[in-house]
Image (spheres, rainbow, N blue to C red):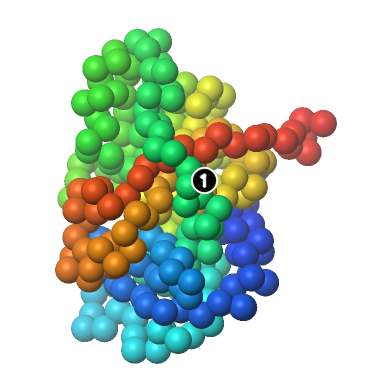
């Protein structure tokens, strides 16, 4: 059983000592994404769950103080953030720190690596619109679980549990890290052959997932940090950023969980 917040804590613990030696050059908060640029030109992204933010004139009390601060202050928000915006700043900072390790990785198609067939039952946690038709063309049986009622109908808990338990392939949005649902989702899986955390904000840090059912991380490399930061500031989303991203996929080397030894 994976405890709530475990994955964020693993990432934070691994990066914290290094974060105290870095400072934040820029932080951008847009309508769909958050971007952080650290010294040395390290860029990091995180999606923003805008629909889960409380209404109000001001949504972040530390606005105007982020540039020039220690990276550790933003990284702390990954585990201590009080809302999805603060946690997004923490995740973007983590991704900026991870960036040098993935900068040269080649583009890989996460869906192609799944080798989907009509025998598969796919659980898509978070609506990935551009992938829906691709998955359906394989003949696989696709079920979508989404929390935003503006995107699609919300399923009841019983249906969600059944989809997760019976799926052979799971595609899970990285934003589940931001609203503290990722551990619950992973705990609800039966015995899928392929589990991918997906999206431009996916933390490409396999060590945080080795004791989970996750088999792949499908994230992104930022090719043009200045352009990405501009797009975020101007309210852009994934389609706008796509020409300036390289999508990558990394397989996780698993270790046995304590209860399996």
17 vs 137, left or right, is: right
Q: Is residue 202 above or below residue 19?
A: above
Residue at point 61%, 78% (across, down): 21
Image quadrant of residue 157? top left
Image quadrant of residue 22? bottom right
64 vs 180, left or right, is: left
Q: Position of residue 211 (x, y in %)?
A: 67, 41
Q: Is residue 199 above or below residue 5?
A: above
**Can residue 33 be seen by looking at this rendering?**
no
Residue at point 41%, 34% (across, down): 108
Q: Position of residue 210 (x, y in %)?
A: 65, 41
Image quadrant of residue 246? top left
Residue behind mark 1: 184
Front in this rendered view, residue 213 or 36:
36
Residue at point 72%, 35% (across, down): 255
Label 1 residue SS: helix
Residue at point 48%, 75% (across, down): 39
Is the C terminus in the top left, top right, bottom left or bottom right quadrant? top right
Is the N terminus in the top left, top right, bottom left or bottom right quadrant? top right
**Can residue 123 be seen by looking at this rendering?**
yes
């Amino acid at each position: 059983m994976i405890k709530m917040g475990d994955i964020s804590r693993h990432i934070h613990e691994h990066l914290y000592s290094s974060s105290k030696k870095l400072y934040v050059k820029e932080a951008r908060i847009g309508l769909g994404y958050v971007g952080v640029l650290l010294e040395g030109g390290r860029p990091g992204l995180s999606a923003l769950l805008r629909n889960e933010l409380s209404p109000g004139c001001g949504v972040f009390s530390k606005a105007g103080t982020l540039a020039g601060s220690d990276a550790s202050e933003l990284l702390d928000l990954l585990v201590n953030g009080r809302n999805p915006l603060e946690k997004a700043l923490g995740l973007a900072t983590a991704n900026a720190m991870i960036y040098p390790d993935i900068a040269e990785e080649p583009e890989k198609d996460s869906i192609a690596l799944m080798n989907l067939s009509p025998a598969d039952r796919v659980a898509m946690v978070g609506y990935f619109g551009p992938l829906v038709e691709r998955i359906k063309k394989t003949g696989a049986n696709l079920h979508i679980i989404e929390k935003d009622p503006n995107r699609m109908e919300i399923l009841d808990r019983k249906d969600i549990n059944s989809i997760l338990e019976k799926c052979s392939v799971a595609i899970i949005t990285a934003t589940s890290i931001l609203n503290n649902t990722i551990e619950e989702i992973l705990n609800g899986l039966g015995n899928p052959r392929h589990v991918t955390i997906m999206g431009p904000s996916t933390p490409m840090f396999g060590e945080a997932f080795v004791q989970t059912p996750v088999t792949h991380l499908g994230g992104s490399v930022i090719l043009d940090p200045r352009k990405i930061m501009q797009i975020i500031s101007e309210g852009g989303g994934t389609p706008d950023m796509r020409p300036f991203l390289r999508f990558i996929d990394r397989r996780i080397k698993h270790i046995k969980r304590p209860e399996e030894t």
